[in-house]
């Protein structure tokens, strides 16, 4: 395992640049922290992993030895990185012992069987990651994000999304019209979560192949997208709460589509 101790090392400079969206998009690479997430990511296939970075002195830490061995069997290089440099690559307070450098999956949205989630400029990384994880669990076929939505491969999103970031197709489209064209091409019914909607989510027809729009945390869904929705549904609320967290609302509505399709099954772990 090659050891890196200098901040001027070219590989280290590349890895550090991946903390910004610009360089992730330019290189097609992103970082994923922690042995637990990396073990799950290995199951997605070695085609995605580019390199393994280990905090110097942590080679024998729980889960790390196994990952180093797995990477070696796959011909993937592992690097030991001095603690102070390693800390510059992680944004978790508790710190991690291992980081994977992954290639961003090149995927397109097509052949939607169940549902497509549309994100209208969602901004919070935690919401984005949670939505991705829930969408995969609910059997949605992918996510189409309007330009301005938080990057699905930023460290905080990757951590919240867990392994879903490598399995669920996410595409970013430059305009609302491109999103709508995708829905037309796939023949999807468009449903929008609307606090002022006349239909309660449990009474509206959300069965069949559907595109579900979730809006920005502060502004909600844009007026132009809302006008193009085939159905607008609201989630009933009592008390003085004005709105639900975007990820919570998305989860409720996604699982309602599953319920109406009658496709929910219980997976044994």
Image (tube, helix red, strand yellow):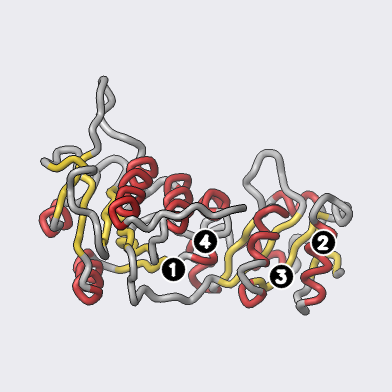
Q: Earlier in the sequence, mark 3 or mark 4?
A: 3
Above or below 217: residue 64: below
- Residue at point 55% right, 73% down? 27
Badge 4 marks a residue whose secondary structure is: helix
The residue that mark 2 highlights is 66
Contact check, label 4 and label 1, Cβ < 8 Å: no
Work out how far the residue at label 1 is from the one at label 3, CA to CA, in angstroms: 22 Å
Of 159 and 229, nearer the camera is 229
The residue that mark 3 highlights is 51
Above or below 10: residue 161: above
Q: Earlier in the sequence, mark 1 or mark 3?
A: 3
Badge 2 marks a residue whose secondary structure is: helix
Contact check, label 4 and label 2, Cβ < 8 Å: no
The residue that mark 1 highlights is 169
- Residue at point 62% right, 53% down? 269
Work out how far the residue at label 4 is from the one at label 1, CA to CA, in angstroms: 8 Å
Q: Earlier in the sequence, mark 4 or mark 2?
A: 2
Work out how far the residue at label 4 is from the one at label 2, CA to CA, in angstroms: 22 Å
Work out how far the residue at label 1 is from the one at label 2, CA to CA, in angstroms: 28 Å
Q: Position of residue 28 (x, y in %)?
A: 54, 73
Work out how far the residue at label 3 is from the one at label 4, CA to CA, in angstroms: 17 Å
Q: Earlier in the sequence, mark 1 or mark 2?
A: 2
The residue that mark 4 highlights is 165
Q: Earlier in the sequence, mark 3 or mark 2?
A: 3
Instruction: Sort mark 2 into few (<14), some (14-19) or many (20+) by Cα contacts within 10 Å.
Output: some
Work out how far the residue at label 3 is from the one at label 2, CA to CA, in angstroms: 15 Å
Q: Residue furthest top?
A: 239
Contact check, label 3 and label 2, Cβ < 8 Å: no
Q: Is residue 193 left or right of residue 154?
A: left
Position of the N terminus by quadrant: bottom right
Q: Position of residue 238 (x, y in %)?
A: 25, 24
């Amino acid at each position: 395992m090659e050891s890196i101790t200098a901040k001027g090392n070219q590989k280290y400079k590349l890895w550090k640049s991946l903390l910004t969206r610009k360089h992730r998009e330019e290189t097609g690479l992103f970082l994923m922290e922690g042995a637990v997430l990396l073990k799950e990511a290995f199951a997605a296939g070695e085609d995605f992993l580019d390199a393994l970075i280990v905090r110097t002195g942590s080679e024998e830490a729980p889960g790390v030895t196994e990952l180093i061995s797995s990477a070696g069997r796959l011909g993937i290089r592992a690097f030991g990185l001095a603690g102070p440099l390693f800390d510059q690559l992680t944004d978790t307070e508790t710190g991690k012992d291992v980081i994977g450098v992954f290639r961003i999956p090149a995927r397109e949205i097509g052949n939607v069987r169940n549902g497509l989630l549309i994100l209208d400029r969602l901004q919070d990384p935690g919401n984005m990651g949670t939505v991705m994880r829930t969408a995969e669990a609910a059997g949605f076929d992918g996510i189409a994000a309007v330009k301005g939505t938080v990057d699905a491969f930023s460290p905080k999103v990757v951590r919240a999304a867990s392994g879903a970031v490598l399995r669920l197709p996410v595409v970013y489209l430059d305009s609302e019209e491109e999103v709508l064209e995708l829905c037309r091409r796939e023949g999807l019914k468009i449903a929008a979560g609307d606090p002022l909607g006349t239909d309660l989510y449990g009474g509206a027809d959300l069965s069949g192949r559907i595109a579900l729009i979730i809006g920005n945390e502060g502004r909600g869904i844009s007026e132009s997208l809302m006008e193009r929705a085939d159905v607008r549904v609201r989630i009933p609320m009592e008390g003085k709460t004005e709105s639900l967290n975007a990820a919570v609302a998305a989860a409720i509505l996604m699982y309602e589509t599953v319920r109406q399709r009658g496709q929910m099954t219980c997976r044994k772990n």
